[in-house]
Image: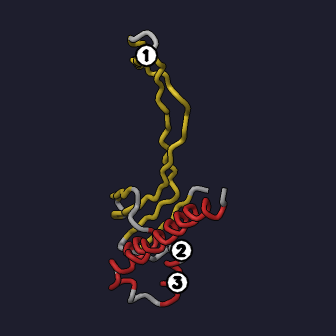
């Protein structure tokens, strides 16, 4: 078996995944070009590297990280805050669960009739996992807190 021929589709898929991540950042910079073009060069580089800082605007965070998984608003006596939550989602295989039997009918050419068999049927069980990576809190149009899970 030729390993080069086998690895070629895998490498092509990996390249596609890597280019999709870059295109995503590029598409957000094009979408918010009026904000991104007005930023200093150092800030543009920082956002491209995936860093957000206290004082960044919601547009800057969006350009850097994209759309959050969830948004929450809090109103207190001190004012209103908005929290963007970024999470990752995964599925974990838990095993198989027996669900019943399936009837299978086959033609038997030796006896000229049909045979009926009952075959056990199972289904895969997966658990859905949500891992909250971090939260970004805004007040008065800028980042005031960045919470990460250590």
- Residue underneath mark 1: 109
Mark 1 nearby-residue class (10 Å; few <14, some 14–19, many ≥20): few
Between the residue at mark 1 and the residue at mark 2, the CA separation in whole angstroms equals: 71 Å
- Residue underneath mark 3: 45
Please give left or right for residue 104 compared with residue 91 in the image.
Answer: left
For the point 50% across and 48% down, the residue is: 90
Mark 2 nearby-residue class (10 Å; few <14, some 14–19, many ≥20): few
Q: In the picture shown, does residue 78 fall above or below 39?
A: above
Give the quarter of the figure containing the N terminus.
bottom right
For the point 34% across and 60% down, the residue is: 77
Q: Earlier in the sequence, mark 2 or mark 3?
A: 3
C-beta proximity under 8 Å, tags 3 and 1: no
C-beta proximity under 8 Å, tags 1 and 2: no
Please give left or right for residue 139 compared with residue 17 in the image.
Answer: left
- Residue underneath mark 2: 51
Q: Which image quarter: residue 101?
A: top left
Mark closer to the observer (2, 3): 3
Between the residue at mark 2 and the residue at mark 3, the CA separation in whole angstroms equals: 9 Å
Q: In the picture shown, does residue 79 fall above or below 52?
A: above
Residue 138 numbered tag: none
Q: Earlier in the sequence, mark 3 or mark 1?
A: 3
Give the quarter of the figure containing the C terminus.
bottom right
Mark closer to the observer (1, 2): 1
Q: In the picture shown, does residue 29 fall above or below 119?
A: below
């Amino acid at each position: 078996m030729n390993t080069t021929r086998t690895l070629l589709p895998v490498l092509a898929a990996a390249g596609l995944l890597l280019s999709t991540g870059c295109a995503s950042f590029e598409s957000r910079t094009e979408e918010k070009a009026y904000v991104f073009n007005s930023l200093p060069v150092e800030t543009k580089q920082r956002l491209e590297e995936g860093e957000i800082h206290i004082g960044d605007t919601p547009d800057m965070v969006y350009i850097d990280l994209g759309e959050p998984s969830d948004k929450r608003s809090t109103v207190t006596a001190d004012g209103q805050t908005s929290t963007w939550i970024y999470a990752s989602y995964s599925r974990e295989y838990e095993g198989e669960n027996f669900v019943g039997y399936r009837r299978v009918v086959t033609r038997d050419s030796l006896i000229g009739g049909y045979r009926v068999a009952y075959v056990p049927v199972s289904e895969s069980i997966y658990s859905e996992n949500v891992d909250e990576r971090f939260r970004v809190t805004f007040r008065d149009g800028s980042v005031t807190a960045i919470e990460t899970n250590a």
